[in-house]
Image (cartoon, grey):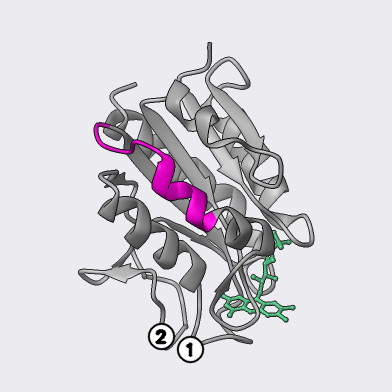
Amino acid sequence: MAKIGLFWGTQTGNTQTIAEEIQKEFGGEEVVALYDIASADPDDFADYDFLIIGCPTWNVGELQADWDGFFDELDAIEFTGKKVAYFGAGDQIGYADNFQDAMGILEEKISELGGQTVGMWSTDGYEHSESKALKNGKFVGLALDEDNQSDLTSDRITTWVAQLKPEFGL
Ligand SMILES: Cc1cc2nc3c(=O)[nH]c(=O)nc-3n(C[C@H](O)[C@H](O)[C@H](O)COP(=O)(O)O)c2cc1C
C-alpha cells in the first residue's frame, strides 16, 4: 500500500495535473495514492501517516468548491500523529491580496485538528502582497502559479519533493 495519501480538488484541472506530477516525482502510485476530494471519504485519510493536501484558491480567498464541501468533514478525521504537507495553485498577479489563501485556510484547520505541518516553502520569487498561507514569513506549503509562472512549476515540484522526502522520513 502507498505510504502517502494525496488529496486534491480542482476547478479547471491545474491542481489535478500538479498532483499527478508530485506523485510521479515521489516514484509513482506505489508511493503516493491520489484522491479527488470530490469523491473522497473521511475514512480514506486513516490509511496514511503522511498526507499531502492540494487546493487552489477560488472566488477571491475561498477554498475550491469540493474542498469547501468537505471542510466540515475534516472534524471527523484523526490528524494527530500525521505529518501533513500542502500545495496550492493560485494567481499572484490577479489576486495579489489573496494569493494561496486556500492553502492557509486548510493548514490552519488541519493543524488545529492535530496535524503536523511539513514542507514549508520560501516566498522568494513571488510578487503577491497578502496571503493567508504565510506563517513565520514562509508559505505553509508549495505555492504554484500556473497563471503567471508555469515555467517554474516543474523545478519547484522537484525541489519540494526532495525536501519532503526526509521530512516524511522516507
Ligand atoms: C474567479 C477566480 C477567482 C480566483 N481567486 C483566486 C484567489 O483569490 N487567490 C489566488 O491565489 N488565485 C485565485 N484564482 C486563480 C486560480 O486559483 C488559479 O487559476 C488556479 O490555477 C486554478 O486551479 P484549478 O485549475 O486546479 O482549479 C482565481 C481564479 C478565478 C478565475
Please tell me which residue lies in front, 118 or 1. 1
Q: Is residue 88 magenta?
A: no
Question: What residue span does the magenta drawing correspond to?
Answer: 71-81
Image-quarter location of ligand 1: bottom right
| Residue occupying the point 54% across, 79% down | 61
Real-space Cα distance between discs 2 and 1? 4 Å
- Total numbered circles: 2
Q: Say which element carries label 1.
A: loop
Q: Say which element carries label 2.
A: loop
| Residue occupying the point 39% across, 75% down | 132
Please tell me which residue lies in front, 32 or 162. 32
Q: Which residue is mark 1?
A: 97
Among the 4 quarters of the image, the one containing residue 106: bottom left
| Residue occupying the point 55% across, 80% down | 92
Q: Which residue is mark 2?
A: 130
Residue 158: % across, % down? 50, 41
| Residue occupying the point 29% across, 49% down | 113
Residue 129: % across, % down? 42, 88
